[in-house]
Amino acid sequence: MIKYILKRIMLMGVVLFAVLLIIFFITRTLPGDPVAMWVGEHPTQEQLEYGRKILGFDQPITVQFLKYFKGLLHGDLGMSLRTQQPVTMELANRFAATFELVTIALILAILLGYPMGLYAAYRSNSLADKSIRITGYMGIAMPIFWLGMLLQLIFFGVLGWLPLQGRVTGYLFAEANLPVNSGLFILDSLISGNGELIIDILSHIFLPAITLAFAVIGIVIRVSRSAMLESMLEPHFTTFLTYGFTPFQILKNLMYKNTLIPTVTVIGMSYGLLLGGTFLVESIFDWPGLGQFGVLSILTNDFPSIIGVTLIYAGTYIFLNFVIDILYFFLDPRVRL
């Protein structure tokens, strides 16, 4: 077990270093001059040269990389050229918002998609199965930004049921005096027991979470349905039928376990998909997370922030896949051989 974990940790380090190497050199070759933004409007040539010297952009790119990597080992991600604040602080202030949104979206996708996939396999080729598969195809094919704006038009513009943007109503959060402030608003509000604040936070996160979740539900449905259909073709399924068990009893007590490994795999991959989707969703819903920060950083050629956001996203995705590998160790005895 220890050897298995150490091997996965080494692979994580290699992948993360490769991501850093690629994104660092790509950001340095993008068009545009971030120094001009750092110096200010209408800079002179002397000011630009001074800015490059202060920021270290006048040095060879290999020297820049070595200095950045040395600082990274000490937890220093550099200074944001746009906000003039440490990138580490900027990411820390926004990580909880993105983590909360993506996690809630993934939980919704699992709670809705997994049972629907199993039921579709159980009622294969029925009207219910076809309806569920159509829903899954719609989730995969529908552009996430279009769905988000459509939900805003319906639930805010037409019905007026849900707020348009943001994480929480400002005055409610300011007056709450939360005993815990972890940045995870749902958890903090539950601990406080403030019912009005809980409802307000849930109403704000509902639309962006559903928008993200809908893009993944189709994948979860297809994988769980396919895995269940394959399991139902196995000889032991027929054996249990001959013993007098109904298909539903077999599915409920045994067959669903055979779908766990492929489903867990797709869930881990879907988390990465959801992280990528936050760039659009957070911009549409004005969600103050890493995705919105990343978009603004890209638009302004804020190199340190772009690298920081990429490393956070990649590190989170790699860590989740590491957790899935560990789950494999317990779910699949063949891995322990």
Image (cartoon, rainbow, N blue to C red):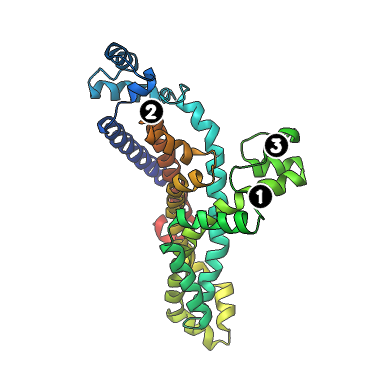
Q: Are marks 2 and 3 in contact (CB under 8 Å)?
A: no
Helix, strand or loop at label 3? It is: helix
Instruction: Using the image, tell me which numbered label, if any, was put on residue 304.
Output: 2
**Which amino acid type is marked by label 1?**
Leu
Counting residues from the start of the chain, the first of labels 2 and 3 encountered is: 3
> Residue drawn at (40%, 60%), measured in percent from left and top?
334
> Residue drawn at (42%, 47%), measured in percent from left and top?
276
Residue 295 versus residue 121 in the image, above or below: above
Q: CA distance from mark 2 to mark 1?
A: 33 Å
> Residue drawn at (24%, 24%), measured in percent from left and top?
61
Rendering quarter of residue 328? bottom left
**Which amino acid type is marked by label 3?**
Phe
| Front-lying residue, 230 or 146 | 146
Counting residues from the start of the chain, the first of labels 3 and 1 encountered is: 3
- Position of 311 compared to 109: left or right? left
User: Can you identify the residue that label 3 sits on?
Assistant: 173
**Which amino acid type is marked by label 2?**
Pro
Q: Nearer the viewer, mark 2 or mark 3?
A: 3
Q: Locate the C terminus and report the quarter of the image it occupies.
A: bottom left
